[in-house]
Each structure stands twice: as C-alpha cells, then as structure tokens.
Amino acid sequence: MKKCISILIVLLTIIACSSASQNIASNDNALNKTGNDTVRIANDSLEYEVIIIDNGFNTWLLSRALPRNYYSLAYLENKNYQYVTEWNIRVQQPNRYSPNLYEMTIDYQPQIRYGYEVNYLIYNYMIYFQNTYKQKLAGYVPQR
C-alpha cells in the first residue's frame, strides 16, 4: 500500500471548451514537459488542458511507446473512449476499485476533436497505467 501511494501520483485532467465542432490539429498543441514526470498539453485558445503526472511515465513514453503516427487518429479516439469510460466507472466505485489508483474522472468527450497529440498521449498513458498497476480497463492491453 505504501509503495502504491508513494509511486502513484496521477492527475489526468481534460478541461474541454464547449465548442465541440472545432478541430485541434496536432501542431496547435503545446506540449510542455514540466518536471521529471509531468506531461502537459495545452491549447489556451480552446481552453483545454491535459496534465499527466506519474513517476516513470516520461521514461516509458520515450523508451517503450510505439512512435507517433503508428496508430490512426480514429483508432486512438476509439480506444481512448473505451478506456476513459471504464476509468470513470471505476472512479465512481471507490469501494470496489482503489481510490488511490482512480482519483478523479476524465472529461473526455468523443465529439470534440482533440487532435492526434492529445489522443496519442492519453492512449499511451492508459497502456502505461494498465501495465504498471496490473489493471485491465478494456479489451487487449499491449505488453510493452
């Protein structure tokens, strides 16, 4: 339990604007690495932000994740929707699933076009999370 608490610091937040019809191209995203294990993607003009804080994620992303453009945007959006849906179900059931792992809901709306970079990072975080913490959110989980 102590190990889990000391290793796990997860904050994955998406704050999406109300204009769902806008398309966010990956070159409009600002990807910033702040600190050793924090990934921040933001687009201030559309008022959304993704922050991923988890010990080891940056290292895993650089060394084990498949390269960008390996998956299609449609594939990433589909998988992210499945993973986020299951994640949010688990957040709402703290007696069944560890609240230390599932701290807060993720506001991922499939009708909003977040762009490739956002979907790529969310997808890879979900793979990292499932492999690192021995969780299975939905379907087959690639072992990387």
Image (spheres, helix red, strand yellow):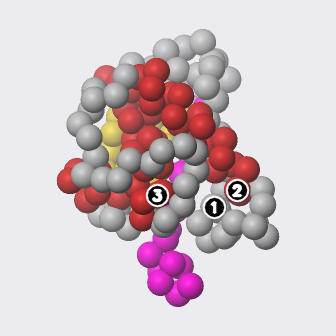
The picture places residue 11, in percent across and down from the top left corner, at 54, 58
* Left or right for 82, reference 26: right
| Secondary element at tag 3 | helix
Quarter of the rendering occupied by the N terminus = bottom right
Q: Nearer the viewer, mark 1 or mark 2?
A: 2
- Outermost residue, front side: 140
**Residue ID at (26%, 59%):** 59
Tell me if I can see residue 101 in this picture: yes
Q: Which mark is first along the chain, 3 or 2?
A: 2
Inter-mark Cα distance, 3 to 1: 11 Å
Magenta-span inclusion, residue 60: no
* Left or right for 28, reference 99: left
| Foreground residue among 39 and 88 | 88
| Foreground residue among 23 and 72 | 72
Q: Which mark is first along the chain, 2 or 1?
A: 2
- The residue to which callout 2 is attached is 90
| Secondary element at tag 2 | helix
Q: CB atoms at circles 3 and 1 under 8 Å apart?
A: no
Q: CB atoms at circles 1 and 2 under 8 Å apart?
A: yes
**What residue span does the magenta drawing correspond to?**
1-17
Which amino acid, mark 2? Arg
Which amino acid, mark 3? Phe
- The residue to which callout 1 is attached is 102
**Residue ID at (53%, 79%):** 5
Q: CB atoms at circles 2 and 3 under 8 Å apart?
A: no
